[in-house]
Amino acid sequence: TKWVYSFGDGGAEGSAEMRELLGGKGANLAEMASLGLPVPPGFTLTTEVCTHFYGNDRSYPDDLVGQVNEALAATEEKTGRTFGDEKMPLLVSVRSGARASMPGMMDTVLNLGLNDRTVEALAASADKRFAYDSYRRFIQMYSDVVLGIDVHNFEERIEDFKDERGYTLDTELTGDDWAELVHDYKVIVERDHGAPFPQDPHDQLWGAIGAVFESWMTPRAITYRRLHAIPEDWGTGVTVQAMVFGNMGDTSATGVAFTRNPSTGEKELYGEYLINAQGEDVVAGIRTPRDLTEAARIASGSDQPSLESAMPDAFWGFRSICDTLERHYRDMQDVEFTVERGKLWILQTRSGKRTGRAALKIAVELAEESMITADEAVLMVDPMSLDQLLHPTIDPEAKRDLVATGLPASPGAASGEIVFSSEDAETASNQGKKVILVRVETSPEDIHGMNAAQAILTTRGGMTSHAAVVARGMGKPCVSGAGGVRVDYQNQTLTASDRVLKKGDVITVDGGTGQILAGSIAMRQPEMSGDFGKLMEWADQARRMRVRANAETSIDAETARSFGAEGIGLCRTEHMFFQEDRIVAVREMILAGDEAGRRAALAKLLPMQRADFVGLFEIMKGLPVTIRLLDPPLHEFLPHTDEELAEVAKAMEVEPEKLRERALALHEFNPMLGHRGCRLAISYPEIAETQARAIFEAAADVEAASGETVEPEIMVPLVAMATELVRVREMIERAADAVAEERGKRPVYTVGTMIELPRAALQADAIAHAAEFFSFGTNDLTQTTFGLSRDDTSTLLGTYTTTGILPNDPFVTLDRDGVGELIQIAADRGRETRPAIKLGICGEHGGDPATIAFCEEVGLDYVSCSPFRVPIARLAAAQAAL
Ligand code: ADP
Ligand code: MG
Ligand code: MG
């Protein structure tokens, strides 16, 4: 087996494609060497050596030593230096490099090969100070990462030494001083390690190689891999590379650069450098790094020269290499470089990490520069990162006065006065105030308060709690589960650690980070500018699936349209029932003792419902609108306080006590599995008939007024049996017949069902006889498939995901294995009966990129998600199709 791959001097045995074998760093060094870029020569031990090491009691393959010696000899030849030589010693760095960049692995060891004799050669070729400074750095690094000696020992020794001599700065130490310290360092090593510091460069080399492989299994590295789902058996590579020195005086330097600005995406070289410095000095923060370009220096107001003015040759050489690298890798690069006595060397390149904003700009501009195709640009942007761009965010420069932290449940940030009830939220908002609704948790009755508030903060509940789900749907910032905050409704205060805030105090909620901040803070408004529009256009060209939105209100529908929704996939009629002007009539309907009473109440609701649908149809201008019949258990609408009960009793002209009895009779132990969905329609056909009538009348009105055709899709929830759907369909048809008679024109519409119960999925062939479309209600389908209540198990799910019982929250990302199989079965069986059946998804999952990829595999016709997720879904659908 070939275990070692050499590179340098215009050629390499490896290449960028060999990332799995050589690790990211080694593969890119090889690639750069082949491109003829100035890369110090060296060689990489493959990740297979690491695998062998752990598979064989931490031992190496037999032929490894031979291959390393051969590669070392080749490196010696390329540099004209010899490892351990007393005149022209080769010094190397030993660097770790996994396939995925992985902090938590061994730190790089620099200057390896120095010993008491080679240091003298180095001193002769440069100067003594530089040579002994390098030697002591090497002893310190090697002792730290290979021998496991506490670096504290060395740092303390330097401080004592400076005190003894009356120095304050490291730069005051002379070559002789460093030489004396090297002596002291070796004493420390011998004392703590029980053996002298290794003088043989080969011992040093194998010590460092072993330490890199060992570091694959440190707790830090193991934790990092677990958090980032990096498999254990990937292993790390080790790169051994000839040293170049950025610390050889004032014509030497070291630095890092991004080929484009990683936070804005602007096309400009962005980075830092230090003169007369080595390796980690730039990031260590001991000296303040300088700007690379003159433009950046002027912008930052620094009086320290830029690389552009201090070392123009090196700078322009570096700039042109950055262009080459970008064009070669066809992506923004993060590049490490060193200048040794005026000569430029490149030490690393990789794709640069970037913000969502930068990702978008870079992808679009690379495509416009014809470096990548439009499809590649679409694939380059993480759909979830668009989330940051669609909402106002806190100005990154602004000062944050942190009060507490909760879960980042819905992105965006907003400031406002604290209110503790939905009533107060509505009142204050009607007075033109901006408010933040603070609750222990929210329930469906809080919708109006949430709607009135700028943002929502809850102390209980997880990422899929009511508050979180509804806030995301509304596109409002929400922090949920802020366990460190105590809400006192009685005294209208919230307490976090020692701070007490009252109603009316201003706070800022940052739903992107989960932070709760005191006062109001400068915000940055979302930019739906050219780049965004362009990427969306390319995404729309690439995708097959349609993207719709879940929307009830005109505001939601307008938002959805502005984000490019191609219809409404779920209009939840019950949300319309909670509005203040209707709830009494809704309660009358529910609490009525007989059909006549219900019809009387429904007659009041009919014009309101019709007006709702007219509003939606007008906004959607002929695009499909799926309207779901009433779904929740009736008890959710029941009056809770005596006051509310009295109000309904008065409207119905009955005794409050009679009503109370009726309300008690409607109580359910397990309402989510109780009297809800199509079961309501079966018990009270007049409800479904009235809703259907409102839909048909609204469609007819809008058609008459606009000339646009409106073909509503009526969706029946919670069907388990085909017979249920057949029955409800008859009710809808009765309403259609009645409207046809009255208006002289038959409504055109389709009837379909939610697939949200396992039985429905299995019976999809039978159900499809009565359904023109299926919409997968994956929230309920997940609950009923797992037998897990989403509202009651957020802590349990936390345990399940952190301990690996579940790979992720199945209410966020669809469970492919179980729920996904049911969806596949339902799609297959539904198509058997009705090949052209329209299939969609309307659960929260409809806006999750991983779920959208699954929907593409199943061949759904569309996904439907909350309006603010529409752009994310458009991009994710495109990526799934490409
Ligand atoms: P990391 O993976 O943490 O970035 P690297 O292996 O890139 O670690 O090493 C860190 C720094 O050490 C580099 O940025 C570079 O400045 C310096 N370095 C590594 N190898 C060499 C070398 N052969 N010559 C000079 N400096 C080097
Ligand atoms: Mg690096
Ligand atoms: Mg449901």
Image (tube, rainbow, N blue to C red):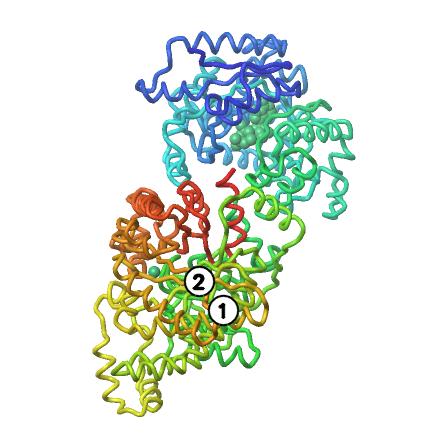
Q: Position of residue 295 (x, y in %)?
A: 76, 43
Query: Is residue 775 something one can see in this rendering?
Result: no
- Residue 649 lies left or right of residue 299; in this view the side is left
Q: Quadrant of the N terminus?
A: top left
SS type, badge 1: helix
| Picture residue at 51% right of the left edge, 41% below the top | 879
Q: Which mark is residue 699?
A: 1
Instruction: Please state the total of marks drawn on the protein image.
Output: 2
The alpha-carbon separation of the residues under discs 2 and 1 comes to: 10 Å
| Picture residue at 56% right of the left edge, 63% below the top | 621
Query: Is residue 859 something one can see in this rendering?
Result: yes
Q: Quadrant of ligand 3?
A: bottom left
Label 2 CB sits under 8 Å from any ligand 3 atom? no
- Location of residue 740 by image quarter: bottom left
How many other residues sit within 10 Å of disc 1, few (<14), some (14-19) or many (≥20)?
Answer: many
Question: Which residue is denoted by mark 2 in the rendering?
Answer: 749
Labels 2 and 1: the sequence-earlier one: 1
Q: Nearer the viewer, residue 129 or 862?
A: 862
Q: Position of residue 664 (x, y in %)?
A: 22, 79
User: Residue 277, relative to residue 478: is it above or below?
Assistant: above
Q: Position of residue 874 (x, y in %)?
A: 53, 49
Q: Nearer the viewer, residue 820 or 838?
A: 838
SS type, badge 2: loop
How many other residues sit within 10 Å of disc 2, few (<14), some (14-19) or many (≥20)?
Answer: some
Q: Position of residue 286 (x, y in %)?
A: 60, 40
User: Residue 403, relative to residue 880: is it above or below?
Assistant: below
Q: Nearer the viewer, residue 502 or 734?
A: 734
Amino acid identity at mark 2 = Tyr
Query: Are circles 2 and 1 on residues that touch, CB within 8 Å?
Result: yes
Amino acid identity at mark 1 = Ala
